[in-house]
Amino acid sequence: MINRALVFTITNAVLFQVGWFVCILCGSFWAGVFTLAAIAFHFMIVQQRRDDAVAVLIAIALGLLHDSLLLHSGQIQFAESAYLPPLWLVCLWALLGITLNHSLVWIYSRPLWSALLGAIAAPLSYLAGVSLSSAEWSSPLVRVLPIIAILWLVVLPLHRFLSLRVLSYVQRKTTRLSS
């Protein structure tokens, strides 16, 4: 018999990986289409919709902040916009959000490990993504990659902290309303 949780975890990871390529290679329109379909599919299946909705929204907010910092500090530039990260990059952050409580929970729930993995994996992902997308480096890689690594020492632990705070707040409000 197939373990449903394992199948879901694998599907969750595969959706993210396929989404990464769609977003990077196909641009904003197809990134938006794929991301909406993936998120709709995800929320049709999962039980913890509130937790995942919070994870997605916080991931998008942190992603916009992260990539806007890179953009406005002159580290990266996008053909689509000089002021905001493009939709395809925002979609990547949304897709990351649906993995954090599922296929990446093993690392996400451990702040020290998530900081270290983020500091290693994120610069590699950006390096690959920029080489395959419409983005371009505005600064030398020896300057940009350490900046991304330092930012990612904070991104996942901060995401977890914010998610737990928001969920705690929502739980208190929900409990108060139902009493």
Image (cartoon, rainbow, N blue to C red):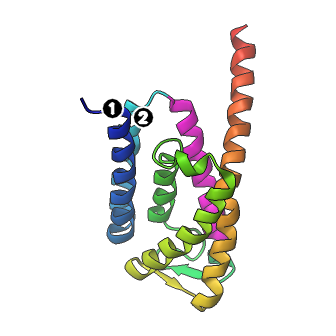
Q: Position of residue 172 (x, y in %)?
A: 75, 23
In the picture provided, is 175 more to the left or to the right than 134?
right
**Element under label 1?**
helix
Q: Image point 41% across, 43% down: which residue? A: 39
Write down the region rendered in magenta: 48-69
As drawn, 5 above or below 112: above
Dominant SS in magenta: helix
The numbered mark, 1 or 2, whose residue comes first in the sequence reads: 1
Task: State the quadrant of the C terminus.
Answer: top right
Report whether residue 37 is seen.
no
Q: Image point 24% across, 29% down: which residue? A: 1
| Residue 4: assigned label | 1
In the picture provided, is 108 more to the left or to the right than 166?
left
Residue 63, picture quadrant = bottom right
**Circle 1: residue type:** Arg
Residue 153, picture quadrant = bottom right
Q: Image point 63% across, 54% down: which residue? A: 61
Asked whether 50 falls inside the magenta stretch, the response is yes
Q: Image point 52% across, 49% down: which residue? A: 97
As drawn, 131 above or below 158: below
Give the crowd class for mark 2: few <14, some 14-19, many >=20 residues within 10 Å.
some
| Residue 43: assigned label | 2
**Circle 2: residue type:** Phe
Query: Marks 1 and 2: CB-CB under 8 Å?
Result: no
For the residues marked 1 and 2, what is the alpha-carbon distance in whole angstroms? 16 Å
**Element under label 2?**
helix
Asked whether 7 falls inside the magenta stretch, the response is no
Q: Position of residue 98 (x, y in %)?
A: 48, 45
